[in-house]
Amino acid sequence: MAKNKTAFVCNDCGADFPRWQGQCSECKAWNTISEVRLGSAPKRTDSLSGYAGQTNAQVQVLNAIDLSDLPRFSSGFAEFDRVLGGGIVPGSAILIGGEPGAGKSTLLLQTMCALAEQMNALYITGEESLQQVAMRAHRLELKTDKLKMLSETSVENICNIADREKPKIMVIDSIQVMHMGDIQSAPGSVSQVRESAAYLTRFAKQNHVAMIIVGHVTKDGSLAGPKVLEHCIDCSIMLEGSTDSRFRTLRGSKNRFGAVNELGVFAMTGQGLKEVKNPSAIFLSRQEEQTSGSVVMVLWEGTRPLLVEVQALVDYSALANPRRVAVGADQNRLSMLLAVLHRHGGLQMNDQDVFINVVGGVKVTETSVDLALLLAMVSSFRDKDLPRDLVAFGEIGLSGEIRPVPSGQERINEAAKHGFRKAIVPMANKPKDTIEGMEIIGVNTLAQALEAIL
C-alpha cells in the first residue's frame, strides 16, 4: 500500500515547507502554515500533459503562429467588458472576488441570464440552493427561461455534466466549496482549492468553455487561498464597494487578454447592478458654494481618465503627535508630501491634524495625485477657496520638482469635456496647442504651483 504524502503549505502565499513552523519565511505571516495531504498521482498522465492538458503538441516557429483575434463575445455590460479587455474570451478562466454582499452573485446572475438568450449557459451554485437563486432572479425581474442551473460541489460531477450539456460559458459559485474525490482534505483547504481550480481550468481550455470562478476574500480584502489560484487563471478581478454605498467598482488586477487596472463602475439598485456610463459625473457631485480644501484631480485608470474630487482638512492639534489620516490614498505618501511642503514650500504643519479623503470611495494608487493633494492641504491650511473649475495633476519629487505623468493630453481633454476652465499641470504635460476656453498653467516646481493659487 502506497504511503500518503503530506506537505506543509502557507495559506496566504502558497509556499511549501518540509516541516511545520510558526512563521512563513516567504510572506512573514504567523500561524498560516497547515499540513495538507497530497492526492495520489493520476494513473493517466496524458490528461495533464501539454498546455492545459493538450495532447499531441507540436513544435512551431514563432512567426508561423496564427495571430488572428480571439473571438470574444460581450457579457451584456460595457463596463464588465472593459475590465475584461473587450469581452469574454472562449476557453478563458476568470476569477472574481469581493467582500460579502458586494454583489458578485448578483452581477453574474444578471450576466448569465442575458447570455443565456444567445448561447448555452450553465450556472453552478454550491453555496445556495436553486430556490434561493430563483428567488433572487425573480426579485431582479430577469429572464429565467433559458439559463440552466445546477447545485453541485463535486468538481468531477460538474465537468461530467458540463461535458454532456456543452455550455459556452459556466459560472462556479464558489471555488471554496468545491472538492475533488481523490483529495482527502476538507473543501476550502489549500490542496482542494488548488487542485479544483487547476481541474476546472484544464476543462475550460480543452473544451473552449469560458468559465467564471467566484472566490472568497480574507479579512484584509485579498483573495483567499493559495497564490497559485491566481496564477492558473487568465483574468483576476475584484468587485469593491462598501455595503453603505450604492456604487461598486470592478477592478482588474491580472488579465492575459487586455490591460490591467481597468476600472468599471456600477450602481446597486433594486433591480440589480446598473453600469455607470460616465463615472466622472458621479464623483464630481460637488456643493454649489465654494469651499476651501477641495480640488478635482484627473486619474488614469486602465485606458481612460477619471475625474475625482479630493478633500483636505487641516486643523490645529492639541496632541503631541498630530494625526495624519488618508482615506483612499497612501498614508506614507501623505507624510512625504508634508515634508516636501515644509522643505520647499515654506509651510509647516507639525502642529496641525491633516485629514485626506478621496470622494466616492475611490482608492488612488498612482503618483499623479500628489499635486492635487498638496493644493487641497494648502487651501485648507490658509482657508482659501479654490476655483470650482480648477483641475490639477502631477507628481512631486523630493526636491520639490513637478514631474510629468503619462497621458497628460488625454487627462486635460477629459477635464475640458466636463467644463473645467483652468488646469495646473506639469510643464512637460502642457500641450503645445491651446484649448479653447481653458487656461493651462504649466509648473516646474512646487513654489510655482503654490504661487498660482495663493
Image: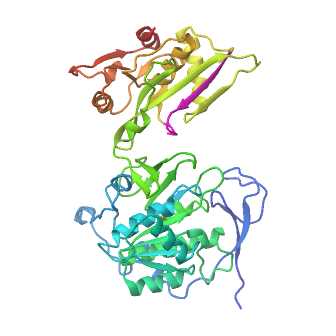
| Visible residue check, residue 231 | no
Instruction: Name the one closer to the observer, 24 or 299.
Output: 299
State the scheme by which the image is colored: rainbow
- When the figure is inspected, residue 391 is found, relative to residue 6, above or below; the finding is above
| Visible residue check, residue 102 | yes
At 54% across and 88% down in the image, what residue appears? 43
Instruction: Name the one closer to the observer, 401 or 261.
Output: 261
User: Where does the image place residue 211, in percent across and percent down from the top left?
Assistant: 43, 70
User: Where does the image place residue 341, in percent across and percent down from the top left?
Assistant: 55, 15
At 42% across and 25% down in the image, what residue appears? 394
- When the figure is inspected, residue 413 is found, relative to residue 362, above or below; the finding is above
138 displayed left or right of 82: right
Instruction: Name the one closer to the observer, 224 or 405.
Output: 224
314 displayed left or right of 404: right
| Most distant residue in the bottom direction | 1
User: Where does the image place residue 417, in percent across and percent down from the top left?
Assistant: 28, 31
Quadrant in the picture for the N terminus: bottom right
20 displayed left or right of 198: right
- Please tell me how many numbered marks the rendered image carries: 0
153 displayed left or right of 134: right
- When the figure is inspected, residue 145 is found, relative to residue 332, above or below; the finding is below
User: Where does the image place residue 267, in percent across and percent down from the top left?
Assistant: 44, 49
Specify the segment rendered in magenta: 352-365
- When the figure is inspected, residue 254 is found, relative to residue 214, above or below; the finding is above
Q: Does the magenta stretch include residue 62?
A: no
Q: Quadrant of residue 409?
A: top left
Q: Does the magenta stretch include residue 353?
A: yes
